[in-house]
Image (cartoon, helix red, strand yellow):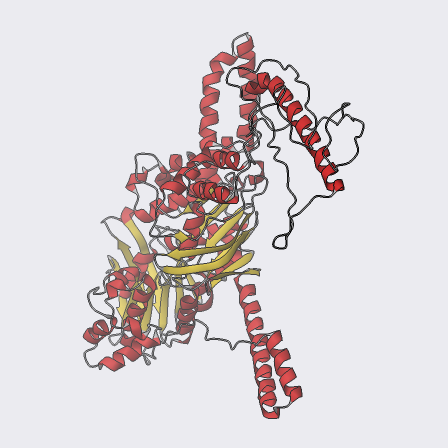
Amino acid sequence: MPKGAPVKKGGPPPIEETKTAEPPKTDLSSPRKNGGSVPKGAPVKKGGPPPIEETKAPPAKKDQQPVGRNNKQKQKQQQQKPGKKYQASSEEEEENDENNENEQTSEDNQSEDGEKKGEDTEESEEKPQKITQKEERKFNKLWKAGKITREEYEKAIGIWKDEVVINEEEKAEALKRAEYISGLIAVTEKKGVKDSATKDIKIEQFTLAYNSMTLLKDADLKISYGRKYGLIGPNGTGKSTLLRHISQRHFAIPSHIQILHVEQEIEGTDILAIDAVVSAVFERAELLAEQEKLQPLSEENSEEGIAAHDRIIEIHKRLRAIGAHSAEARASAILAGLQFTPQMQRKKTKEFSGGWRMRIALARALFVLPDLLLLDEPTNHLDLDAVIWLEAYLRRYKKTLLLVSHDRDFLNGVVTEIICLREQKLEYYKGNYDSYEKGLMQTKKQQEKAYKQQQKDIAKIQEAQDKNARDKKKKMEKAGIVEKLGKDYSVKFIFRDPGTLGYPVTQIKQATFGYNPGPENHLFENLELNIDLNSRIAIVGPNGTGKSTLMNLILGELEPTGGEILRNRHLRVAKFSQHFVDQLNMIDTPVEYIAKKFPEMKQQECRNKLGLFNLKGDLHNKPISLLSGGQKSRVAMAEIGLRMPHIFFLDEPTNHLDIQSVDALSHALQEFKGGIILITHDQRLVNTVAKELWVCRGNKKVEIYDGSFDDYKQEIVDAMPDELFIDSDNE
């Protein structure tokens, strides 16, 4: 302190002046509220530090504001009794004097440094001021609503880093979130982890709704890269909605994860089927176009020519890595596996029906090899041979698969884990569907045993009514009461005994058939086949070889052009097919429909018969047009069951049926006392019902297969070419 400086009365004795360490430089983005340095001669508060000599600083750049720190002195406050005045002690005054001196010196030094640094501020980015929690929440809501980008959000709250780059895909996602208003899907909050390193997906505590109905509540979605998941659950619980939600990225899924969802058929255009598949890999087309553009330049003897040559070498390496040179062969093999003949592969996509264009969409997805492949009932549009091929292909798929299917055997052959959608939650189980079912049954047995034991203990406690019993009751309640198991979702079909019938039931003798005249147009020639009430026959073979035609010949819907088909005159037959379901009178209710078909039955009896096929009472009086596909199938099954056919013809009966319904149908057909002729893509139905395989190979014959269904499956798998399975990890 300078000689002669005034000292506050009663304060500490004068001390020698010491140099204070230069404080750290303050943020340029935090302007001082009270102005810059203290002018020369400015008055100093009594008891504070002496005036400091003015120092000259370089002139500030135009529009550059001096910066510093708001050095408001901190006041110590104490609770006072009324009327008593607080007086600071000499030690507190000394501490305040030193703090004031240090803060004033720091303020002026920072002002000087700030003015010097002002000339370089154009090259550095200003850091934002700290904001309140209320402001941070406001910016957070704006970002989640898609009204600002992540860059703007992080800059606003002060956590932005220069190395973070927002790509165009993320900007597009933010715009999509802002524009998307859906009555189909509602989520309480977009949740997930945008991790730039992993291909795993983890979304915690999310809620998913369809219109006003909650499908999932506080559920967790966990998908690990490279695993194959089967998503199961009763119809209407939200499986398809969840897949759609994932594919449209309404969760926070890392943008580098490539997702493909086979949901809709491709548009019918002039493009050939084979080209529609190959063109699905955009990178290949772009690399080939770049190579063609650089080829003339690479032949020049110049720096540009050398650079073009080097780039072409890099393009060749990348094309090899993605299997581009074998692309057409691989695309052709995929289409062939999905039952496209070479001639069909060269047809325009607009010449195919909707079902075949769906197969092309599936072929494109398999060709691309996305990081996450989403398939929703892919077997619905395929015949049995194509299903067997697809199962073998997906079994060797090296990336992530999320699959919804009602085909138990297909799930068993493909998936490694099961996700069960039950009671608005997602439950996870290791293994395939059979493993899941065994584990679930074991868990239920243990829970049922624990429940019965606990009920016995509760009964004993209630009888005792002493302190020891009350302690046991409290201990039991603390450990948790075991809940009684509710009734599981189950389905039951019943087909009544048709009675006996004399031989022959149906006999095919030297039968020939063709839709157009001439031997060259024959589908079948000289067929010799027999069917009786013990027959359990599955008609199999590639698409277009006449499976449905053969069924209709046996049924009597088509007449042979040569030879004959003999039938017992007392024979009753019934056919179930998707066409039959579509022919239901959509205006009638199920009860009205059955009553019209069987006028001798009373209304209550009609209700009872519908109940045998698991059609619940609240659906009996709804128009058939308002029923789901599975519910319509049950109405049709009920009608066929009431006809008591001697031979039951089924053409793809499992479409729209869930796993429980397919199991019920399989069990009912095994118990059925009549004959069965079956065409289906469901492997479980073939495995459990069929005793014979009749194979149509397109050679005008019907082969009674010498071997098991597993042998037939292996025959198809062995024919799959190696070009199908390029190393997807090289991509």
Query: In this picture, is 327 found above or below 308?
Result: below
Say which of 704 and 51 sits in front.
51
**Residue 41: x %, y % from top left:** 63, 20
**Residue 44: x %, y % from top left:** 65, 27
**Residue 159: x %, y % from top left:** 56, 36
Dividing the image into 4 quarters, which one contains the N terminus?
top right
Query: In this picture, is 378 found above or below 360?
Result: below
- At horizontal 70% and vertical 43% (from top left) the residue drawn is 88
The answer to whether one can see residue 377 in this image is: no
- At horizontal 41% and vertical 76% (from top left) the residue drawn is 671
Pick out the residue farthest to the top: 301
Say which of 280 and 23 sits in front.
23
Pick out the residue farthest to the bottom: 463
Dividing the image into 4 quarters, which one contains the C terminus?
top right
**Residue 485: x %, y % from top left:** 50, 76
The answer to whether one can see residue 332 in this image is: yes
Query: In this picture, is 728 found above or below 594?
Result: above
User: In the image, is 257 to the left or to the right of 37?
Assistant: left
- At horizontal 61% and vertical 20% (from top left) the residue drawn is 39
What is the count of numbered marks? 0
Query: In this picture, is 50 found above or below 276?
Result: above
- At horizontal 47% and vertical 50% (from top left) the residue drawn is 390
User: In the image, is 286 to the left or to the right of 98?
Assistant: left
